[in-house]
Amino acid sequence: MIDHNKVVEILRTIKDPQSGRDIISAKMVENFQVDGNNITFSIVLKTNDSQLKSSLNFACMEALQQSYPDANIHIHLKINSDNTGESNSVLPQVKNVIAIASGKGGVGKSTVAVNLAISLMKKGFRVGLIDADLYGPSIPTMLGLQGQRPKVELLYGKHKIIPLEAHGIYVMSIGFIVEPEQAVVLRGPRLGGLIKQFIMDCLWPELDYLVIDLPPGTGDIQLTLVQTIPVTGAVMVTTPQEVAVIDAIKAMNMFLLPNIQVPIVGVVENMSWFTPKELPDNKYYIFGQGGGKKLAELADSVLLGQIPLVQGVREGGDEGKPVALHNEGIMQVEFSRIADNLVRQVHIRNEVMEPTRIVKVEN
């Protein structure tokens, strides 16, 4: 006699290749019935991938037949009609993809990406972080992950990279693969291949936000990103000075091109002012004023927040303990406010705009 509960436990051993969760926990099994010698159920998929369907069907059949070799097993594979769109086909377990971009290097983009990701995590969101700045990966240092290597798992004939975890967020970076002093010398196609691998060949869990730290400027990595995965929105990072804003406008305009159309969900102004400890009421605008506000207005977006020039931000990044981890202090408060504003803007964007889709860019 076939035991209903035993069949469920057998199915718990079958993993979804996209999320790494078992198909029972992932709520992929529907219409489950055990009737005499018959086992019938449906597996609900979020993407019409023939190899995925074949692999799951074979894995379920093999596992069940080991315990019930004489059973009649009927497995129906169906696509969730609410998720057949291209917008969910690459990483269906990820709700929002946020690109962190800038026009110039040295404006603190990676610092913003790391502290924003941690601030979102502290608010209860499930967060992943991709270091897509392949030529200058700094996130392993900022999160205290130097020297660590991600594990690789063979899942239904495909090798999947397991992202590392730090401070409650999931992380992937080329810095986990190459030595710290090793120069990364890659041309466009190889760069694009690495970005695709970080997105499609990593076993990302269910995430509310996948934050992607892009290199400065506009180039192969940015184009590969929007051609590989639907980007919910971009956050532009700039300093107040005119030179940084000019380059940030160029980077912003790439996202707003008619054939790309990734909305700018906000602007973060970094190094907005300096306040010495001995003069806490004084603000010195070393890099000028108004750059972030100007960029936000040009993007028809909002200024998510302004980050002052504070020594603790640099120290936290160097020590692998970002300031957003603190439970108090001006920087923790500011990054928390920026995260709140981003969540609000993403919600508005998802309410009033069509779901994002993979961009078709012709060479």
Image (tube, grey):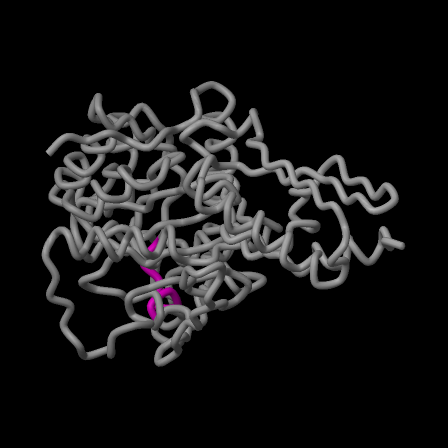
Image quarter of the C terminus: top left
Q: Residue 94: within the magenta?
A: no
Question: What is the quadrant of residue 349 in the picture?
Answer: top left
Tell whether position 310 is magenta: yes
Is 157 rendered above or below residue 236? below
Q: Residue at x 20, y 57 (%)?
A: 106
Residue located at (85% from left, 54% from top): 5
Residue under the image location 37 percent in, 30 percent down: 302
**Left-right relation of 185 to 268:** left
Which x, y percent locates residue 191? 19, 55
- To which quarter of the image does residue 34 belong? top right
In the drawing, does residue 2 fall left or right of residue 358?
Answer: right
**Residue 274 can be seen in this image:** no
Instruction: Give the total number of marks visible in the rendering.
Output: 0
Quick one: quadrant of the N terminus?
A: bottom right
Q: Position of residue 77 (x, y in %)?
A: 59, 37
Of the pair 148 and 360, the residue shown nearer to us: 360
| Residue sitting nearer the eye, 124 or 356 | 356
Residue 225, image x, y percentages: 28, 43
Q: Which residues are magenta?
A: 308-314
Q: Residue furthest front?
A: 70
User: Relative to the observer, which residue lies in front, 322 or 172?
Assistant: 172
Image quadrant assignment for residue 327: bottom right
- Residue 249 is left or right of residue 161, and the answer is left
Q: Residue at x 46, y 31 (%)?
A: 345
**141 sits to left or right of 167:** left
Q: Is residue 347 above or below residue 281?
A: above
**Do we see residue 141 in this rendering?**
yes
Using the image as rendered, state which of residue 342 and residue 215 is in the foreground: 215
Indicate the position of residue 143 as horizontal and vertical percent values: 41, 69
